Image (tube, rainbow, N blue to C red):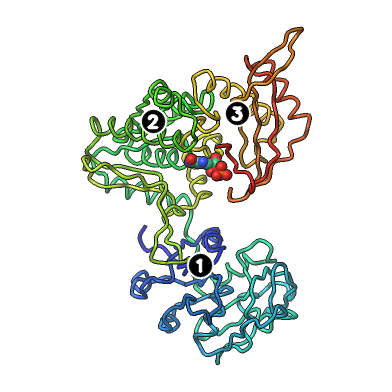
Amino acid sequence: MENKELVIVLDFGGQYNQLIARRVRECNVYCEILPYTVDIGRIKALSPKGIIFTGGPNSVYDESSPHYTEEIFKLGIPILGICYGCQLMAYSLGGVVTPAADNSSSEYGKTQTSYNNSDVLFGGLPENGISWMSHRDYISRVPDGFTVTAKTSVCPVAAMSCPEKKLYGVQFHPEVNHTDNGKAMLKSFLYNVCECKGEWKMESFIDATVAQLREQIGDKGVVLGLSGGVDSSVAAALLSKAVGSQLTCVFVDQGLMRKDEGDFVEETFTRLFDMNFVRINCQDEFLAKLRGVADPESKRKIIGTEFYKIFWDKIRDNYGTGYFAQGTIYPDRIESGKGDAAKIKTHHNQVAIPEDISFEGVIEPLKDLFKDEVREVGEKLGLPHELVWRQPFPGPGLGVRVIGEVTAEKVRILQEADAILRDEMDKCGYAEQMSQFFAVLPGVKTVGVMGDARTYDELVAIRAVTTDDFMTADWAKIPYDILGRVSNRIINEVSHVNRVVYDITSKPPGTVEWE
Ligand code: XMP
């Protein structure tokens, strides 16, 4: 998009860096995260309205701690330093950062803070409030020209500013919800210091992207691998709006999706969108490859290899010219400032294109968006709620939820049980409160009694978790009566299941999936 207002988040390796960028975007200002190793020439060329230095795990005195050329403070571009970023600003400009000799100067968590609300960051906000702190070192003297604008009982400089040079720093984390009015402080920096207008809106993103896609693609074809997940679905919807039937979506249905999911995806895209939709039904091929294989990693490998073989064979023969599109999103391609900053995170959504296929180019229409922004675009383009808010689903699908060898009968049992679970969770309104829930078929047979007869049949396990990021997760405390209904229905309605158990393991030590 031309002339868009840009704010740069300069990444010094802190844990909240993506959150800072999201908060900026929530203020309708476009921003990008760049690693602290970025050349200042690139920053100048981008001509940002403002720069935010993130936190980081280091002390400015560590030999390996990330620094940045002091020239950045002379560009006349407003800078807000957060936590480590604030200390780095103070240190670089001649202030004093005192290393934590003991724990008395450390602050972690919610901290009572008093603000000077004649400062632009805190104008119009209460004089006292909670801020979220996470630091050991502290600034004991601000650089010349700066004034102290907030403090706590142990931290003499909880915020500092030099309005003349448009330089601001906060020791706490305004991006975290626990900081009272944190978002208002960021907003004030963006609007009152950087003079942003807040023009980053999803409607304008869609219009601009559609125009740009039309120009780039011209009258060529474009092919996209559609999985039915959120990212590829939204990319498909956006491309369809741009070039309609020039778009071909290839949907490889390996027969390891949830019950009726393949039909739902086909129905959605053929009914609601103008495109060429190609579905390849290949459950038999996958099951043949998986016959006799019980090891989880081997199964994953086989499913991945077979998937790409079928996918590329189809494309090579039919759609190997024109453009290749994929649903890469912003977090997939952020260069992290952590550790060895030269390393770039593995792009797990970006697939390797076989050498014998030469496309005109690769198109990633969602490459600048965060997940919640992708969902917003999906909703605006008319994708069904169910697709836009879909839970994560592993690439190998039910192949890793049927434990051990995968057979057609086991997949059928699992699909039926999982559909009942979903139905009951939807009916009682619990589905929206869960981060992820599903059924697992452990492949264990147990003894039961049905009517007067002894049974020896399959066990189904229910897994449900709540989590913010899937790195850790709590098992969900689903009320017993709901679990009871799910269990009754599965045993009564799914043939060859005689027992249901609920997984009460958190992550760690468990993982969300069983394989
Ligand atoms: P775990 O089991 O590692 O899962 O706690 C964390 C999240 O990742 C999903 N997951 C996968 N997604 N391919 C994927 O695309 C996979 O092989 C895979 N394994 C796990 C899982 O569903 C959960 O949301």
* Residue linked to disc 1: 13
| Residue visible at 69% across and 74% down in the picture | 107
Foreground pick, 231 / 96:
96
Per the model, the C-alpha gap separating discs 1 and 2 is: 38 Å
Among the two numbered marks 2 and 3 on one chain, the one whose residue lies closer to the N terminus: 2
The quarter of the displayed image where residue 353 is located: top left
Among the two numbered marks 3 and 1 on one chain, the one whose residue lies closer to the N terminus: 1
* Residue linked to disc 2: 251
Dot 3 amino acid type: Pro
| Residue visible at 48% across and 67% down in the picture | 9
Residues at badges 1 and 2 in contact (C-beta under 8 Å)? Answer: no
| Residue visible at 61% across and 89% down in the picture | 141
* Residue linked to disc 3: 442
480 with respect to 158 (left or right) = right
Q: Percent x, y for residue 318?
A: 24, 30
Among the two numbered marks 1 and 2 on one chain, the one whose residue lies closer to the N terminus: 1
Whether label 1 lies within 8 Å of ligand 1 gets the answer: no
Per the model, the C-alpha gap separating discs 2 and 3 is: 28 Å
Viewer-nearest of labels 1 and 2? Answer: 1
Residues at badges 2 and 3 in contact (C-beta under 8 Å)? Answer: no
| Residue visible at 52% across and 86% down in the picture | 164
Q: Classify mark 2: helix, strand or loop.
A: strand
Whether label 2 lies within 8 Å of ligand 1 gets the answer: no
Q: Classify mark 3: helix, strand or loop.
A: loop
Dot 1 amino acid type: Gly
Label placed on residue 184: none
Dot 2 amino acid type: Phe
Q: Residue furthest top?
A: 452
Q: Is residue 379 visible?
A: no
Q: Percent x, y for residue 227?
A: 43, 35
